[in-house]
Image (cartoon, rainbow, N blue to C red):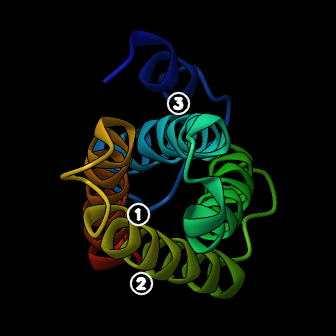
């Protein structure tokens, strides 16, 4: 876990409530890491000679990147937290990561970038699951 995510949560001037800070920090970090990795995987897919066969992978990579980035930003903002929307967004992120991981795993033997992306997606999926377990 990066030092800065945890440090920013620790320095937040208000009480974060019942949220598990470690799970929250891990999920924020995993979301942003996954967003970057999915974007890079989509770009790598575009550079492949067989790009037409990777159209579905590219699309799901970009969808997952957008969902992860949005989730990371929402989780970072703690003032006026909307618990119901947060749970829904984290659940959507988990689903996007699961779908992207499955797609990338189907290409992982041939494309190393897809293997790396699948690993990042599985990590984010687990971080979302862990955070959801702590949310009321």
Element type where label 2 sits in the image? loop
Q: Residues within 10 Å of mark 1 (few under 14, many from 20)?
A: few
State whether residue 91 is above or below residue 59: below
Q: What residue did someone put label 1 on?
A: 18
Residue 100: percent from the left, percent from the top?
A: 45, 69
**Which label was assigned to residue 112?**
none
Q: What residue did someone put label 2 on?
A: 136
Q: Residue furthest left?
A: 109
* Residue 100 in the figure: left or right of residue 104: right
Q: Residues within 10 Å of mark 3 (few under 14, many from 20)?
A: some
Element type where label 1 sits in the image? loop
Query: Which quadrant does the C terminus fall into?
Result: bottom left
Judge depth for marks 3 and 1 and give the one in front.
Answer: 3
Residue at the spot 54% in from the left edge and 71% down from the top edge: 93
Query: Which quadrant does the N terminus fall into?
Result: top left
Residue at the spot 32% in from the left edge and 75% down from the top edge: 102
Whether the residues at callouts 2 and 1 have beta carbons within 8 Å, the answer is: yes
Q: What residue did someone put label 3 on?
A: 9
Comes first in the chain, label 2 or label 3? 3
Q: Residue furthest top?
A: 3
Whether the residues at callouts 3 and 1 have beta carbons within 8 Å, the answer is: no
Viewer-side residue, 13 vs 57: 57
State whether residue 89 is above or below residue 16: below
Looking at the rendering, which quadrant does residue 112 occupy? Answer: top left
Element type where label 3 sits in the image? helix
Residue 94: percent from the left, percent from the top?
A: 43, 74
């Amino acid at each position: 876990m990066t030092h800065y995510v945890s440090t920013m949560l620790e320095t937040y001037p208000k009480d974060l409530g019942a949220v598990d800070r470690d799970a929250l920090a891990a999920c924020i970090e995993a979301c942003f890491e996954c967003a970057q990795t999915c974007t890079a995987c989509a770009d790598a897919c575009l550079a492949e000679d067989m790009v037409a066969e990777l159209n579905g992978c590219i699309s799901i990579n970009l969808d997952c990147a957008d969902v992860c980035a949005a989730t990371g930003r929402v989780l970072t903002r703690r003032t006026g937290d909307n618990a119901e929307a947060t749970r829904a967004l984290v659940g959507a992120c988990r689903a996007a990561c699961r779908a992207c991981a499955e797609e990338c795993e189907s290409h992982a033997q041939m494309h190393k970038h897809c293997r790396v992306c699948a690993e990042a997606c599985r990590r984010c999926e687990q971080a979302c699951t862990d955070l959801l377990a702590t949310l009321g």
